[in-house]
Image (cartoon, rainbow, N blue to C red):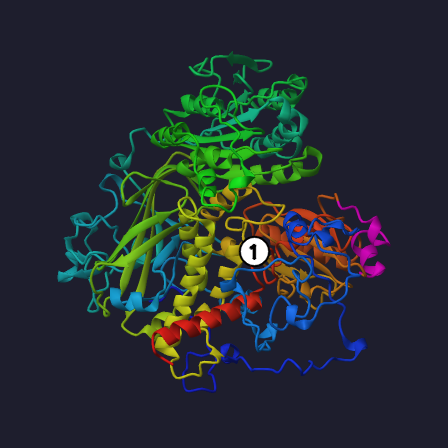
Amino acid sequence: MPMRPQRPVASPPSANNLVAPMQNMHLQQQQQQQPLPQRPLQQQPQHAKRVYPVNPEVASMTNPAVASQPSNKPWPHGLPPPTQPAQSPSSAAGVGYTQGPYTNTGQHLPPDLRPPQQPRPRIDPDQMPAPVQVREQDQMVFGDKFFGNCNPRYIRSTMDKIPFSKELADQSKLPLGLVVQPLAKPKKEEVPIQTIDHGEEGPVRCSRCRAYVNPWCTFIQGGSKFVCSICSHANQVPTWYFANVDMSGRRTDVDQRPELRYGTVEFQVPSDYHSSRKPAPLNYVFAIDVSGQAIRNGMTQAVCDALKQALYGPRGEGDSRLQSENRVGLITFDRSVQFYNLAPALSQAQMLVVPDINDMFLPLQEGFLVDPVESRDVIVDLLNSIPTMFKDSVRPEAVYTSAVRGGLLALQNTGGQLFVFQSCLPNYGSDALRMRDDKGLYNTDKEKQLLNPQSEAYKDLGNECVKNAMCVNTWLFPSEYIDVATIGAISSLTGGDLRYYPGFNGPRDSSKIIFQLDHDVHRETGFDGVMRIRCSDGLQVIDHYGNCHMSTYTDMDLAGIDQDKAFAAVLKHDSKLDIAKGANFQVALLYTTRSGERRVRVHNLNLSVTNQIADVFRAGDEDTAISIMLRKAIFDAHHRNRRDIHSKLTEECVNILTAYRTNCAASTSAGQLILPEAFKLLPVYVHGAVRSHALRGVGVDMNIDIRAASMKLLNSLSVYELVTSLYPRLFAVDRLTGEDGVANLKGEVKLPPMTRVSYERLNTKGAYLLDTGSDLYFWLGSKVPSEFLEQVFNVSRLDQVDINMSTLPILDNSLSERINDIARQLQSERARCLQLRIVRQDMDALEFAFSTWMTEDRNAEVQTYVDFMCVLHRKIQDEMKKNSNY
């Protein structure tokens, strides 16, 4: 049974039924002497002038004359004033464009990335496939449907029809793998996951491969045996589990056995499944930096305020939002570590200082981990007092690893979650890090050294945390280099988050911390986990990617696991598959719940097997494919040159499209760009990946910490979060119509139609919301009507809009309410806080950051999306010629 049905494919005019009409794009040759027909001036829309993320240092070096000219533009893109004479069309950045960003800067792309120029093909950018149309179509067709197996939210495969042999898989050039999100958040209307308790017997499992009984097992010999769906071994059914079968082989009690009906279930398990420690409810320790830097930038105050709200609601005035069985402990640290006795009998917390950070110990046995209900007053009073207690601190040191070891001492018997809030580079003690950021190494073969930890002590500490089931969540608030690559290693190994907030400003950014900490504390969370992915005979898992520790080549040790984390597994054939049986996959996560119950969550997936390459391409999943391709690229970035990774991603995309062209559309003309329907967005996703912070190397907004933080983030994102980060969602909100911005009976707000992400699409009279996954940009055109400003911002002129607002005002009119509801809906679909950022065209420096998210535009390292498609087309043609197909 397929995981989900395929998108409907329109029948093309050609005989090949895999070629969609939209993709049947013939590159018509055009004489340059013939000008394009121009519309009357009054009919041409006023689009926004492009803002290109060009490094001004490079621009000034390549063209000193340009650099010396005055410019009143606020963003640092290094472009000259618009009074420059227009260049000839032949110098345009891309095919079909007459306004090139590097016409005046003199910057050039590498030869292999330059689009063909002579003669210039004429391409309509609207014909290029974009996620805009596909996402809207998918939402209409698939949005409220469930397709059997486990929900695709838990497991997604790069293809829903598995090649029956290694040769066929190699022929397709497609990555074969799964993306797994075992604790993904279900929708409210979905049936809750069934929990099954078989008592001391435990769940029924295969005696050979240890897979759990599931709906794809078959019962034989009158129900006395079952055939494992994974290894096909015939197992004896335990006496207590026996039931007769009907004529079709269906058990008579199947309706009373959720594990035989549902693709996802949870088993409560006996003590045999316990780890080295007895299961206990989840405990939390919060370690707060109180060094001079943390006090000055407002981090300490913001974290204390956020922690009060996460534990006790707004302003810390409510009841405990954690259960009484969950315990809470507090640590502060600078060059020493301070523990706090929070016993409920005390009138105020007692501080105990451990000055010797190289020999950490827990200075109290009782009163550190406390019931948040009983000790509410003591905890709230301490959080109110911490910023005042350390307000005069001038110590520049903050000992990160000592704080981690302090939390480990407190949680070593039970496991749990540690949140560490750090503001500066750990520069004191035996684990002090040196300042190694060297811009001279950027974009060289030695840059990869900066992406690997500079000290093995951090890896060793991370492994120790895994052994003791302590998940470390690291929150960084630096004003300069902090070595994310080294500090973040502990969180990556333990399954935790790395939250990175450079240039943090307390008054401006505190709302983001409040939202994010509340989400992280209260999302579905487990700990002390082990996950294994099993697959049918003929397939094996060869690689794992994600925030985890691999104790063996099959088991992923998860000190912590939550609803936001996803993992990728790469598969390969070791023998041929049986087309009649299909391919089965089972993901089993053994973990301890927040309340202290030991459970196994099991996800099952059955996919059909094919011996036709056309079926492989037709049943592909481009979103999952790019998720695995990007994770591989991020892994390679620690060992290979970044430009080589760019080339490898492009080459993989070319190989996939060439394989389709060769095997499924060989009869078409060489001048046609033919894309498989299921992978027509792969080029734009590869283009977005190369532009991402994880792989981009040029720009004033880039440094090695930003790159390392982005790599760690993308390595843990779900498929949905990842692809919407590569190609963000852009909505025009100045012309809402019909039901746009109106909630349905489920409370879900209808979003307006999406707009392609390019400055060419922005109207100077318009207003747009851009959801990047971490920020919500509100772009206002320079000629936006005053009526719009009055209804949304309660001002009449653009220069009166407060660009520092953290939330939109709620005014008494329909437009204001709709836009606010749209913003809330966008936030509800994201795991990270969408911080509001107001951008006024030609007025705010923030427009440069906004421009870096225009995925279809060119930047200092990557050509436009249209040009990238031309490059791909040329490379595909070259590959076809090599294979003597033309």
Quarter of the image for residue 80 reads: bottom right
Q: Is residue 370 above or below residue 613?
A: above
Asked whether residue 787 is drawn in magenta, I would say: yes
Q: Is residue 206 above or below residue 875?
A: above
Q: Amino acid at mark 1?
A: Glu
Give the magenta range. Answer: 784-803
| Residue 101 in sight from this viewpoint | yes
How many numbered discs? Answer: 1
Task: Tell which of 430 and 67 is nearer to you.
Answer: 67
Quarter of the image for residue 390 reads: top right
Q: Residue drawn 50% across and 68% down?
A: 871
Q: Position of residue 76 (x, y in %)?
A: 70, 48
Density class for disc 1 (Cα within 10 Å; few <14, some 14-19, many ≥20) is some
Q: Is residue 109 left or right of residue 559?
A: right
Q: Position of residue 482 (x, y in %)?
A: 54, 32
| Residue 144 in sight from this viewpoint | no
Quarter of the image for residue 109 reads: bottom right
Which residue is label 1 attached to? Answer: 861
Task: Tell which of 774 and 841 is nearer to you.
Answer: 841
Q: Residue drawn 56% across and 50% down?
A: 830
Task: Tell which of 115 and 539 is nearer to you.
Answer: 115
Task: Tell which of 882 and 64 is nearer to you.
Answer: 64
Q: Position of residue 834 (x, y in %)?
A: 62, 47
* Quarter in which the C terminus is drawn: bottom left
Q: Is residue 515 left or right of residue 213?
A: right
Helix, strand or loop at disc 1? Answer: loop
